[in-house]
Structure formats: C-alpha cells, structure tokens
Image (cartoon, rainbow, N blue to C red):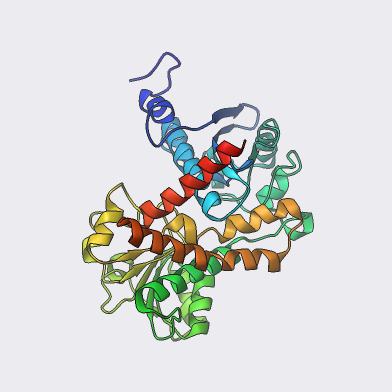
Amino acid sequence: MTDVTGAPADVLHTLFHSDQGGHEQVVLCQDRASGLKAVIAIHSTDLGPALGGTRFYPYASEAEAVADALNLARGMSYKNAMAGLEHGGGKAVIIGDPQQVKSEELLLAYGRFVASLGGRYVTACDVGTYVADMDVVARECRWTTGRSPENGGAGDSSVLTSFGVYQGMRAAAQHLWGDPTLRDRTIGIAGVGKVGHHLVEHLLAEGAHVIVTDVRGDVVRSITERHPSVVAVADTEALIRVENLDIYAPCALGGALDDDTVPVLTAKVVCGAANNQLAHPGVEKDLADRGILYAPDYVVNAGGVIQVADELHGFDFDRCRAKAAKIYDTTLAIFARAKEDGIPPAAAADRIAEQRMAEARTRR
C-alpha cells in the first residue's frame, strides 16, 4: 500500500507515528547526471548538528533504503548522546552497488546535497565509503569528516573504534568478575576486518586467548600467520558454541543476536563493534534471562564517531583517545543503572541517552 505521494505507507508510519520515528527531517536526493540516489535522515539536533556516516549499499528497494536510513539515524542520536558529543544523530544512504556505480561525479553531487543542509548534518564514512571518498565529498561540502590526514582529517577511525570496544570489554569484566583485566580470558571475535583485527591486537597485548572467524578466508589467514596463538574456527555458528568462551564480540554485520543465536551462546559477555546487534526488541531480555551480560553496541563502538567529531575542532589523536577511554566508565555506569532499575543494559543505555537529549531540549 502507498500513500498519495507513492511512498510505502509503512515507511511514513514509521516516520510520523511509531516509537522508532520522530525524525526531524528526511531528504531524498537525486542527481540524474551522475546516477545518484540518496537518503539523508536527521533524527535529532537536540545536542547539536546531526553527525553520522554515509552508507553506500545495493538496497533491494528504495523503501528499504529509507527504512535503513531512519533506523541508522536514530541509532546515531543515542550513540552520540552516550559518547558525550555535542552532536545529534543523522545518517545517509546512497542506493547502489559501490563497486559498479560509485564515481567522482556521484560523490561530488552527494557533497552538494549535504552542503545544502547548511551544517545540520555532518557526514563521514560507513559501509561502502572510505577516506578517499570523503576527500572527494569534502571538495563540495565543508561539513565532511573522516577525511585523510593530507586533507585535514583523522584518517581511519577503526583504530579508536576497536579501542573503545576493548574498554567496553574491560568494563564488563570489572562488573562481572570484579577485575578489568582480560588476561587468560577466552574471547571470540566474529569479523576481523577493519575494526576486528585491531581488537585482536589489544586483546593479545593483554594476554587474552583469542578465537576468530570471518567469511573472508584470506583475512583470517593474515591474522593467524601474524599471530600463531590465535585460533580460527569455521564460522560464527561454531564460534558461539565454543566451550568456556568468556566474551563474544560480534564485529561484522548487524542482527548477530537473534532467536537462534542467544539460546546456544556459551559466552558470559557480549561486547562487539557491530551496529544494531539485537535482531529485534526483546532479545536484550533473552540475554539477561540467560545471565549473559550485554554491553550495548552503540556505547562501546563509539570510538570512531568520537574521532570524526574531533576533526571539526582540529584533530588531536591523544585528545580523542582520552575521550574513547571514557567508554570504560560509561559502560560501567550503564551496568550500574541496569542493576538499579532492574532492566537490561540496553534499556538502561536508552534511558540515559533519552534523558540527555530531553535535558538538551529544555535548554534550547
């Protein structure tokens, strides 16, 4: 069913009527000359200009692209609030296979659309976009982060993303076992790409036992050849069933925690870099019912957004690393709030983020 504009009615219902909506602005962008089709979603500017990456992905439909942009933008509001940033949440998606349709002309056209918002939305990298792409976008739009150091940016944000996840793991260990050290803990990482391989380095440096898996065999081989102590398993299904697994770190795609995964998960903690790990509402309670401590993904993976936000003020790595280190304290505070309120940590994180946004609205 569609509305009078031809847009799927369920998308507009999400935007205007559901708890998952409430977005301030959604912009549909099209440049026929370059083939650009994009959606820019601004969920909130309560804390400041919306900040979030640009995802370049071959969506099955325009409706799916809009729905993803809405969901991701909302998530960025919560992530930025919990990271203590003076930014609201936004996200953009470009529709199409980046391997086939990405071009300089398309990226420049996209930059012009972002610039037309006058700073209400600040963009960065996400799935399908890279530092080199942001350098091109920045030629048309000064509200662009995630650029190369040669162009005034911070470069690869995966370094601090992994550091933040590592701090989240330390907080979980402190909360659950009374000691933040990860030495001799067995930690399984699903996805050892940009973020995951840095996480491996942090864990090995502390003396943890690391088990990995990835759909790309060459990536796994690269890890195990460089670090012979790392054990590889065939797939995620095998990883989540490893006996005596202390921590499971989903670092690939979203939806890693679902009705099939949670009942067989052997880990006592879930703490990873992937976005939107909970496949649907209610999974957080399933984890809690099984006694599995969940570190909310948008809290522990905020190191990257902390890094790109700092570009707007003249990037300083040490300053960013110090901010990312506070993810340890933030995660502990969430666990404490969850225990106090008798709710899962994911719900506690949402409450804290919503409170910060509400307080910002009252000050406006």
Q: Is residue 269 above or below residue 244?
A: above
Quarter the C terminus occupies: top right
Image: 223 above or below 305: below
- Residue 295 appears in view: no
Q: As rendered, which of 34 and 143 lies closer to the eye?
A: 143
Q: Residue at x 28, y 75 (%)?
A: 242
**How many numbered markers are drawn?**
0
Q: Quadrant of residue 45?
A: top right
Asked whether, in this view, residue 227 is left or right of residue 176, the answer is right
Question: Taking 187 as reference, is 43 left or right?
Answer: right
State whether residue 81 appears in this view.
yes
Left or right: 153 as drawn, with respect to 322:
right
Name the image quarter holding residue 48.
top right
Return the x and y of residue 358 as percentages of the image width and height: 51, 40
Expressed as whole percent of the image width and height from the top left, the position of residue 301 reads 50, 60
Residue shown at the point (68%, 50%) measured from the top left? 145
Rendered position, 222 above or below 15: below
Rendered-image quadrant of the N terminus = top left
Check the image and name the residue furthest to the top: 4
Q: Name the spot of residue 55 as percent of width and height, x first.
A: 54, 45
Rendered residue at 45%/78% (across/down): 180
Residue 214 percent across, percent down from the top left: 41, 66
